[in-house]
């Protein structure tokens, strides 16, 4: 499975990872209008409306609604937290054969929450859900095999289940599979593959993956820090970047705090580039999340020129996907390039993982 470098156009590994819950999802068997109403209400934080709809359908035997109701009780969303009721609804959902309910019921059994811990039974429910393609169950099953917690430790089985979940972009599975490729447990050691997987997880907010990327960067030959316009990119913010760009004579297209990205005509500050987007995370001052430079590239000569420039500065790429996407792991900053011949565009991005994932949520 390819893990494309994310673009945005205008858990420390020494700590034990934890099993993941399966969040509510829209009911597939409910009338579409009610399913959409419940899903939108939940997304907006109107848990009372979601609870009312899901309860009606749960009491009518709908497995997805049962699972969703269990999540509300488990997390205390719109109701008082009640582990017993959460367990009840997860168990009822599991009995219907719904994969999310089976996964969440297995998690309660594995953790001993509201019921005596029974890891063997938890593994059975995870396996049933995982074989139906449920990504959290696949991750949880992989975690049990990796740790050998009440199942025979089997890194190959762990890698296989992590791989299935990672193919569905399950963040924690991406991180754990990246770790296995880095260490060569259950798979052949492959640092480039590890970098791509950890990068994908880090950009989705995995603290484990961010720290492991930093560890990998420290183990590589020294690379220079990511500094642009006199600013160290992992330690700057919107106000500092605006001041620096003014000094460099950048032409402003848009500087507006109502948007996460400031836009510039890049010609004066990055010869050959046609646009620069600089995007920020939440807070005041807003920290830098990523910076993207876009170049017109009617053929691959522009790609060759920029790749040479980046390689001369940062050394050989840490990883790549084919000939047209490359990645440099600098630890707290990741540099990526992508050539899109069908669009006639080449992009150069500088990303700060600890902030970037927050820009995806805005």
Image: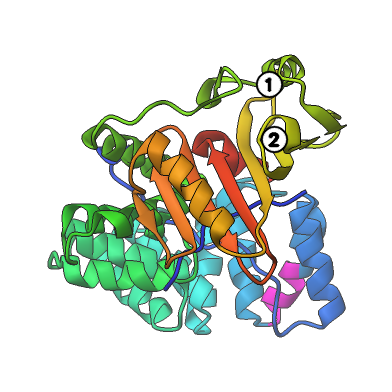
Q: Quadrant of the N terminus?
A: bottom left
Q: Does 80 sit left or right of 233 as displayed?
A: right
Res. 325 visible in picture = yes
Res. 203 visible in picture = no
Q: Is residue 165 above or below residue 12?
A: below
Residue at x-position 42% and y-position 26%? 225
Q: Which residue is tagged 1?
A: 241
Residue 156 position by quadrant = bottom left
Instruction: Pinpoint residue 253: horizontal percent, then vertical percent.
Output: 86, 35
Q: Nearer the viewer, residue 116 or 98?
A: 98
Instruction: Pinpoint residue 236: horizontal percent, then vertical percent.
Output: 59, 20
Q: Does 224 sit left or right of 281 as displayed?
A: left
Q: Does 105 sit left or right of 276 as displayed?
A: left
Residue 231 position by quadrant = top right
Q: Is residue 22 magenta?
A: no
Between disc 1 and disc 2, whose residue precedes? 1
Residue at x-position 42% and y-position 64%? 321
Mark 2 burial class by Cα count in 10 Å: few <14, some 14-19, many 20+: many
Q: Is residue 240 above or below residue 12?
A: above
Q: CA distance from mark 1 to mark 2?
A: 9 Å
Instruction: Pinpoint residue 176: horizontal percent, then vertical percent.
Output: 32, 55
Report the predominant secondary structure element of the magenta stretch.
helix
Q: Are marks 1 and 2 in contact (CB under 8 Å)?
A: yes
Q: Which mark is residue 333?
A: none
Q: Nearer the viewer, residue 246 or 184?
A: 246
Q: For the residue labelled by badge 2, is the local secondary structure a helix, a strand or a loop?
A: strand
Q: Which residues are magenta?
A: 54-60
Q: Which residue is tagged 2?
A: 278
Q: Nearer the viewer, residue 145 or 51?
A: 145
């Amino acid at each position: 499975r390819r893990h494309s470098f994310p673009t945005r156009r205008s858990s420390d590994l020494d700590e034990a990872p934890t099993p993941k819950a399966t969040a509510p999802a829209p009911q597939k068997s409910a009338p579409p209008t009610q399913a959409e109403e419940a899903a939108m209400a939940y997304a907006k934080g109107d848990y009372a409306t979601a609870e009312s709809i899901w309860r009606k359908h749960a009491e009518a035997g709908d497995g997805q609604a049962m699972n969703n109701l269990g999540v509300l009780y488990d997390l205390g969303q719109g109701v008082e937290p009640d582990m017993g009721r959460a367990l009840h609804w997860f168990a009822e959902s599991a009995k219907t054969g719904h994969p999310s309910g089976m996964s969440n019921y297995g998690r309660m059994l594995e953790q001993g929450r509201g019921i005596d811990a029974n890891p063997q039974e938890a593994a059975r429910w995870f396996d049933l859900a995982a074989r139906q393609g449920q990504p959290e169950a696949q991750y949880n099953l992989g975690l049990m095999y990796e740790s050998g917690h009440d199942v025979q430790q089997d890194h190959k089985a762990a890698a296989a289940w992590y791989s299935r979940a990672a193919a569905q972009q399950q963040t924690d599975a991406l991180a754990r599979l990246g770790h296995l490729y880095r260490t060569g447990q259950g798979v052949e050691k492959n640092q480039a593959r590890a970098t791509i997987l950890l990068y994908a997880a880090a950009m989705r907010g995995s603290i484990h993956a961010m720290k492991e990327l930093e560890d990998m960067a420290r183990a590589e030959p020294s690379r220079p820090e990511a500094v642009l316009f006199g600013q160290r990119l992992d330690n700057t913010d919107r106000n500092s970047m605006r001041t620096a760009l003014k000094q460099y004579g950048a032409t402003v297209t848009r500087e507006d705090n109502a948007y996460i990205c400031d836009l510039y005509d890049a010609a004066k500050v990055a010869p050959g580039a046609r646009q620069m987007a600089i995007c920020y995370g939440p807070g005041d001052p807003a920290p830098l999340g990523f910076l993207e430079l876009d170049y017109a590239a009617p053929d691959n000569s522009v790609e060759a020129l920029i790749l040479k420039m980046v390689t001369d500065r940062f050394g050989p790429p840490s990883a790549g996907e084919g000939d047209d996407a490359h990645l440099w792991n600098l630890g707290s900053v990741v540099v990526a390039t992508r050539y899109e011949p069908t669009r006639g565009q080449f992009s150069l991005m500088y990303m700060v993982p600890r902030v970037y994932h927050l820009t995806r949520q805005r």
